[in-house]
Image (spheres, helix red, strand yellow):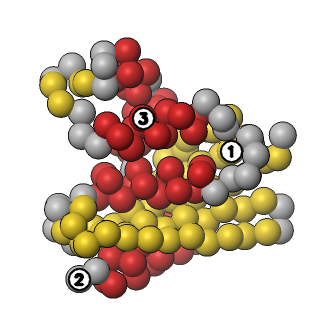
Amino acid sequence: MKEVTIYTDGACSGNPGPGGWGVILRYGDIIKELSGGERATTNNKMELTGVISALSALKEPCKVSLYTDSQYIVNAINQNWLSSWKKNGWKRKGGELKNPELWKKLDELLNIHDVTFNWVKGHAENEYNNRCDALAVAQRDKYK
């Protein structure tokens, strides 16, 4: 199984507002950047869309080390919130789950790839996270 490292980030002006996402995929010496955005969205939606876009870009099942500055996404996976939401009909204990269609898509992708989620501090000294942020902000600014 190929081993891939992925960095993702999302950005939004207002919540909701114009937003963007940025992704870096690394496989050995090969680096690929992806990005996109929407006119009216939320920060969490852009964070999730970045992760989904990155995993969807993989052409075969891979072992993935994924880095994001979204504690929401990391905790949803590492603390088994996603499993609980799925078991509860895509609802949270407190009621509505935001962006269930995105969480469902992520769940599908996690059944294909062996993904380890890692949190990285945003806007710090991680060059790949900073590059993802720049990609996301550039896309966000296209929709302002």
Question: Which residue: 29% across, 43% down?
Answer: 99
Q: Quadrant of residue 96?
A: top left
Between circles 2 and 1, the one closer to the viewer is 2
**Residue with the mark numbered 2:** 144
The residue under label 1 is which amino acid type? Val
Report, in whole angstroms, how far the alpha carbon at label 2 lies from the one at label 1.
33 Å
Residue type for callout 3 = Lys
Q: Nearer the viewer, residue 25 or 99?
A: 99
Q: Give the residue at x 43% y 21%.
A: 83
Label number found at residue 13:
none
Label 1's element?
Answer: strand
Q: Residue at x 53, y 74 (%)?
A: 131
Residue 32 image offset from top left, x and y in percent: 68, 70
User: Is 33 left, or right, of 90 in this rendering?
Assistant: right
Q: Quadrant of the C terminus?
A: bottom left
In the rendered structure, the answer to whether residue 125 lies left or right of residue 98 reads right
Tell me residue 2's x, y (percent).
82, 46
Q: Indicate whether 13 appears above or below 52.
A: below
- Please give left or right for residue 48 compared with residue 93 in the image: right
- The residue that label 1 is drawn on is 64
Q: Tell which tag, 2 or 3, sits nearer the viewer.
A: 3
| Residue labelled with disc 3 | 104
Q: Is mark 2 on a helix, strand or loop?
A: loop
Distance (Cα) linking label 2 and label 3: 29 Å
Amino acid at the residue labelled 2: Lys
Assess whether mark 1 and mark 2 are in contact (beta carbons under 8 angstroms). no
Q: Position of residue 111 (x, y in %)?
A: 61, 30
Crowd rating for badge 3 (residues with CA inside 10 Å; few <14, some 14–19, many 20+): some
Q: Could you tell whether 118 is left or right of 134 in the image? A: right
